Every structure is written in C-alpha cells, then in structure tokens.
Amino acid sequence: MSFYDEDGFQGSEPQVFAGDRSQAESFMTQWYLYTIVNDFDMFMTPCKVAMIFLTYIKGPLVNTWVHQQIQFLREELAQGADEHALAREIKRRFNIKFMDNLQQERARATLRAGVFMEGYEVDEYVATFEELIRHAGYEYSTPQTIDKFTEGIPFALMEKCMTYDRPTTYEEWKTSLEKRVQLQVHMCYDHALLVTGYDVLLSTLQGNLSFSTSSISSFASTHAGPDCFSLFDLRPHHVASSDSCFRPHHVHCLMDSLVPCYLYPISP
C-alpha cells in the first residue's frame, strides 16, 4: 500500500546516511527506490536530484565531503557543464568514498566470469544481475552492461527477444525477457493440460466407448494443431478408413502419436 509523506512524495524516505560503510549499499538501494517511485527524473533536473541526494547525507563523518560536492556542482554548473554527467559524477564519488572497494572488485570479477539465467527464473536472474551491477559501480544504460545481460540469457530465449521485440535498451531487454518467459511458461502449462487430457481420454476409451475417426481427428486438430496426423503420419498406419471406428485397444497407439505431436516445439 503506497502512502505520501508531508512533501507529497510516495513511499518511505531513505534513512540518513552518516558515513557507516556497512550501510552504504542499503542507503543507495533505498535512494534508488525512492527516486523511481516518485519519478524524479520526470520533473526534476539531474542536478536538483543530486542536491536532494546530498541532503540525505549528514553527520560529522560526512559533512565535509557533502560541502565539497556542493561546491563542485556550483562551479561546474556555472561553467555550463552537462547536468547528467555531473549527477553521475556525484554518484561515482559517493561509491569511491563510501562503498566497500573489495565488494566492487568481487562484483566485477563475477560479471567478467559471467552470470547465467537458470531455466525460466527470470526474476532471480534480473535481481542477481542488477545487484552485481550496483556493487560494480556500472551504469545500466551502457552497451557493455546490456551485452553482459544478454550473454546470460539462454540462446533460444534471447533469439525470440531479438526476433519478436527487438529490444535495444536495458529496460527493453528486461521487459522482453519477462514477456517471452511468461509465454513459454504458459505453453508448458498448456502441454501439461494435454497430458492430463491423455489420462482422461485413455480412461474413456478403456470404458468400452468407441470414437469415430472424425472425432479423433477433431480432438487432435483442436489440442495438437491441424497438422497432427500429417506430422506423424498417423492416419495411414492407425485408421483404416474415414468411417471406421477407433476401438479401445487402439488407444495407446493413438495417444503415443498425439501427445508427442502436441509437445512438438512451437513458437509463441
């Protein structure tokens, strides 16, 4: 449930950072969430966001550093420096001053070795990747970061993302990957439903009911696609004629052909 503070902002404010290095990562995570929830980039200049960021850094251990950064921003703005570059520089300086440098090196080494997505665990992959990027001090928008992200995606999924969605930015890649995984999971669910249908049809046919070949063909076309019989050449081997009946003792040869037909890989 969202809420607004007295200044009209949503969510919880970041806790004030007083210089404890062990709290630096937590503080940056809180700050990142706060800016995203309130869309700071939509209605504030990058330098104003950087100034607000500095107001959350207070205490005897950090006051001198904060004063230095304010002076730096004033001087650079007076000379017409790019505001986006200045905001990135403030973040970089914070990371250098307060972040665990060994943690940064470990994160960069892990990224160099490669991080890979397991199965359809897209949320876990994205969370792990983004945590490493933050620890490494990298930007999400750089081509190198995007390349690292795509390297960890299974080739079949990456190919579908490129074919159907053509993502270019990091956020577009995340959205595309989530969409393709969701579609793939839905297809697997449909496959599972067919296997359940296998058991139901098997029980029905073994109950001494008889199905006409037209009924079997309709079932196959509905659940496995119109090319089911042609793909597996089922009709010539298992069905004598269009008006013959399919008796219980034929059920295994039918379903042995029908189920693999449905499970044949398909595109989303």
Image: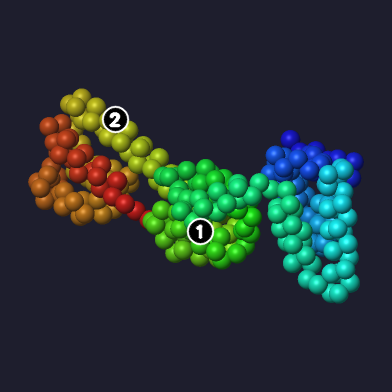
What is the secondary structure assignment of the residue under circle 1? helix
**Do the CB atoms of the residues marked 2 and 1 lie less than 8 Å apart?**
no
Identify residue type, mark 1.
Lys
**Depth order, front residue of 78/256:** 78
Name the mark nearer the viewer: 2 or 1.
1
Disc with the residue nearer the chain's start (2 vs 1): 1
Identify residue type, mark 2.
Val
Residue drawn where x is 60% and y is 64% of the image: 142
Q: Which residue is mark 2?
A: 200
Q: Position of residue 265 (x, y in %)?
A: 31, 52
Q: In the figure, residue 238 lies in which quadrant?
A: top left
Q: Position of residue 19 (x, y in %)?
A: 78, 43
Distance from disc 2 to disc 1, alpha carbons, whole Å, reads 46 Å
Q: Residue furthest bottom?
A: 79
Q: How many marks?
A: 2
Q: Which residue is mark 1?
A: 148
Q: Residue furthest top?
A: 207
Q: In the figure, residue 10 lies in which quadrant?
A: top right
Q: 210 left or right of 15?
A: left
* Screen quadrant of the N terminus: top right
Residue drawn where x is 45% and y is 48% of the image: 117
Q: Could you classify mark 2 by the number of other residues whose Cα lies within 10 Å: few (under 14), some (14-19), or many (20 or more)?
A: few
What is the secondary structure assignment of the residue under circle 2? helix
Q: Position of residue 60 (x, y in %)?
A: 87, 43
Q: 90 left or right of 58?
A: left
